[in-house]
Image (tube, rainbow, N blue to C red):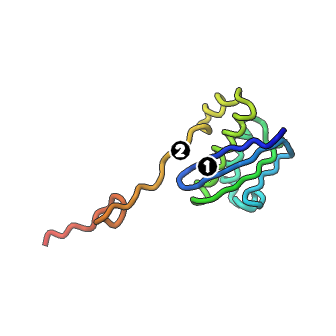
């Protein structure tokens, strides 16, 4: 099996992944998953699509992650893994969609407006 590539985005984080059959090793920016995401919650988020399809030890995943914070990066990686698994086997798409792993979360930070300190916060009103 050759490499299957996929892309996942969340906020300003972008995850580009390359998947091939292997032992279940996940390498992110030339570092191990546990080194890159020390939090077990974030590791769980990344592995959710693999756990759902019982494919945790079947594929080696090489990831290029950039932009955003650690939460956005982990969710971008989850989307990319789900998309790659669908490229490998299209029958899995309904199960992944049911769990919400195929939907790109398009929420991002609202821009700051001129004449205001933040996006929606106004400067304090002074009557006198």
Asked where in the image residue 57 lies, by quadrant, the reply is: top right
x 69%, y 59%: residue: 37
Mark 2, other Cα within 10 Å: few <14 / some 14–19 / many ≥20: some
Name which quarter of the figure residue 100 lies in: top right
Give x and y (percent) for residue 68: 57, 59
Q: Position of residue 16 (x, y in %)?
A: 67, 50
Left or right, residue 128 beside residue 25: left
Q: Quadrant of the N terminus?
A: top right
Number of labelled discs?
2
Residue 85 in the image: state x and y as whole percent: 72, 37
Q: Secondary structure at mark 2?
A: loop
| Residue that label 2 marks | 105
Picture residue at 70% right of the left edge, 52% below the top: 43
Q: Are marks 1 and 2 in contact (CB under 8 Å)?
A: yes
Which label's residue is closer to the chain start, 1 or 2? 1
Q: Position of residue 97 (x, y in %)?
A: 61, 32
- Considering every residue shown, the one lying at the far left of the view is 128
Q: Determine the residue positioned at 62% across, 35% down.
A: 99
Q: Which residue is at 13% across, 73% downward?
A: 128
Q: Which residue is mark 1?
A: 75
50, above or below 128, in the image? above
């Amino acid at each position: 099996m050759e490499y299957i590539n996929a892309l996942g985005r969340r906020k300003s984080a972008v995850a580009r992944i390359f998947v091939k059959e292997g032992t279940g090793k996940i390498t992110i920016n030339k570092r191990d998953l546990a080194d890159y995401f020390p939090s077990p919650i974030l590791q769980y988020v990344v592995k959710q699509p693999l756990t759902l399809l019982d494919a945790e030890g079947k594929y080696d995943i090489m990831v290029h992650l950039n932009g955003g914070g650690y939460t956005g990066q982990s969710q971008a990686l989850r989307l990319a893994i789900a998309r790659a698994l669908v490229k490998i086997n299209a029958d899995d798409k309904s199960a992944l969609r049911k769990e919400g792993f195929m939907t790109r979360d398009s929420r991002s930070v609202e821009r700051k407006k001129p004449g205001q300190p933040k996006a929606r916060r106004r400067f304090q009103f002074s009557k006198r």
